[in-house]
Amino acid sequence: MFTHFTKEERAVHYPPDRRAFMALKPYMLLFFGVIIFGAIAAAWLQYLLMGLPEDPSLSFPAATATDAKDFPMWLNLSHWVNFFFLVLIIRSGLSILADHPRLYWNNGCAPETEWIRFTPIKVPKDKTWTAKEDARYISPIAGLPGYKHTIGIARTWHFLTVPFFVLNGVVFIFLLFYTHQWQRLVPVSWKIIPDSWNVFVHYATFHFPVEPNGFYHFNALQQLSYFAVVFILAPLAMLTGLAMSPAIENRFHWYPTLFGNRQSARSIHFMVMFSYVIFIIIHVALVAATGLTRNMNHIVLGTDNTTSVAGIYIGAGIIAFTILFCLLAHWLSWNKQRALQHADAAINGNLWRITLNRFKPKPYYKRADISPYFWPNGKAPSSEEWQKLAINNFKDYKLRIGGLVENPMELSLTELKNLGKEQNITMHHCIQGWSGIAEWGGIPISKIVELVKPYPSVTTVAFYSFGEGLYGGLYYDTNTLDNCLKPQSILAWEMNYDPLSLVHGAPLRLRVENQLGYKMVKWISSIEFVETYKTLGKGQGGKNEDDEYFNLLADT
Ligand SMILES: Nc1nc2c(c(=O)[nH]1)N[C@H]1C(S)=C(S)[C@@H](COP(=O)(O)O)O[C@H]1N2
Ligand SMILES: [Mo]
């Protein structure tokens, strides 16, 4: 089942240091502590001083003719479909998180400013420490894929399952309101809040409240938590997910600020996942504790049978199927990566191509927004050619521009600078999860296009680097000509008003602001105008697309 690793792969996927570690900033510990222990302490105080409050379930009105008194098949089906996709989404999400195991409230993601980290490593100050080096190993027991870790495949599972999760949710909500089933979940009176508190006081002080028959009624706290899971957590997960897209962020800057900023959207996305996990644990425990047989017959068979074990068996069968599917998913992730990548492209690639990829970036950030820290990524070139150029401050550098163009050219840095300059302050989004705001100065690619005159058949521009990819071989990536002509798409020689540093891509790097970071080739040696990306490298559109199964279009 486990696949063989080459030496380079082993270093990336199965590093010697695989310690699981977590560090939470004291202020966040205090925050969670106050909420959780504060609530429990208040419940005890009320109990000890005033006794147990009345159990609101005792005063339920008798069921009326319009009440929900069944579990229809669509509801049960959608519950289990939801469970299945949620498992895949959470597990692939954990793998994505492991690729940048830090969460922040600020856009710049400076080390030490994270409120939680899932790595024992403190970023060294005396040497370059790239975001790739900072990625962590995650066990396949927790994460999908885990073990043979590529964020490309983790994202493939995340994005492949999300449309089905959303579709299932939409159908569920529609049928919920089309029938009378909404009455199960949607509170109709604010009394739900004190009632839920009273139920909570029971649980917190180890008094089980009276168990209403869930076939007709949930207790107040149960109803409120189901309501929150469906109507708060799920939408919040989707909305914060969208807030992480570079195509959205650099066009509709106000959108991520609905959640604070891009990184707090990511933190909230994580907390939603965490809330789901806590919910699932408590939900399953209470389903078991309050009459497993009967409860399972409700949610599996839709009957109020108290003796038949059919519900338990079928439910266990669905859980076993989900586990088996996860095993299959691991096997696919380690052996059929290309097929997964293409399946994702067929669904999401096409979806983003006709939607998000049409947005044009707009200027927004000011000098004061520039991040004090900017994570570096990628392997600096080891080639003699580049090192010789670097020693001489790139005076002898010539950018080669060719391919399907009328006027192939070689341009020195001075010649490029004489063509003109545009300066933009933008937010960079790395696929791994970190971001950073910086100023970039350079020549708009549209200017180069005017000069070299690509043939009408050109759809794609390839950018080649002096540097290598993760497993060796020259780094390159392609962008659609269309994205290269968008506002703020430039070849930059300047970062934060200084010449581009060696670490960040000297002498020349790409900026295409509606895309993720890996599309923005650093240490550029040459540019080629082509008809299709398919004839380059392994034909997937770039080094990371070839080797790490990243997306061809990087709008999300
Ligand atoms: N040549 C080359 N360019 C590259 C990479 C690389 O590994 N090699 N990494 C990319 C990735 S994943 C990111 S996030 C950005 C990082 O740019 P920075 O180092 O300036 O932050 O560069 C991109 N360009
Ligand atoms: Mo990246």
Image (spheres, rainbow, N blue to C red):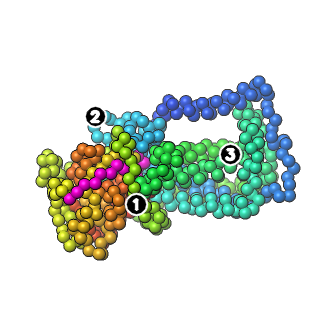
Earlier-in-chain disc, 1 versus 3: 3
> How would you rate the neighbour count of disc 3 (Cα within 10 Å): few for under 14, some for 14-19, many for 20 or more?
some
Q: Which residues are magenta?
A: 419-434
Amino acid type of the residue that numbered disc 2 sits on in the rendered structure: Asp
**Residue 332 horizontal side relative to residue 464, left or right:** right
372 to 476, vertically: above or below? above
Q: What residue does disc 2 label?
A: 126
The tag on residue 389 is: none
Report helix, strand or loop for mark 1.
loop
In percent of the image, x 62 and y 55: which residue is there?
83
Question: For the residue marked with disc 1, what is the amino acid?
Answer: Lys
Q: Which residue is mark 3?
A: 225
Q: Position of residue 252 (x, y in %)?
A: 46, 54
Instruction: Judge whether 327 appears above or below 207 on screen.
Output: below
Q: Is residue 44 left or right of residue 440?
A: right
The outermost residue toward the bottom is 456
Q: Is residue 270 left or right of residue 120?
A: right
Q: Quadrant of residue 526?
A: bottom left
Position in image of residue 129 (x %, y %): 32, 41
Q: Quadrant of the C terminus?
A: bottom left
Is label 2 in a helix, a strand or a loop? loop
Q: Which residue does the numbered mark 1 point to in the structure image?
A: 360
Q: Amino acid at mark 3?
A: Ser
Q: Residue drawn at (74%, 44%), measured in percent from left and top?
A: 190
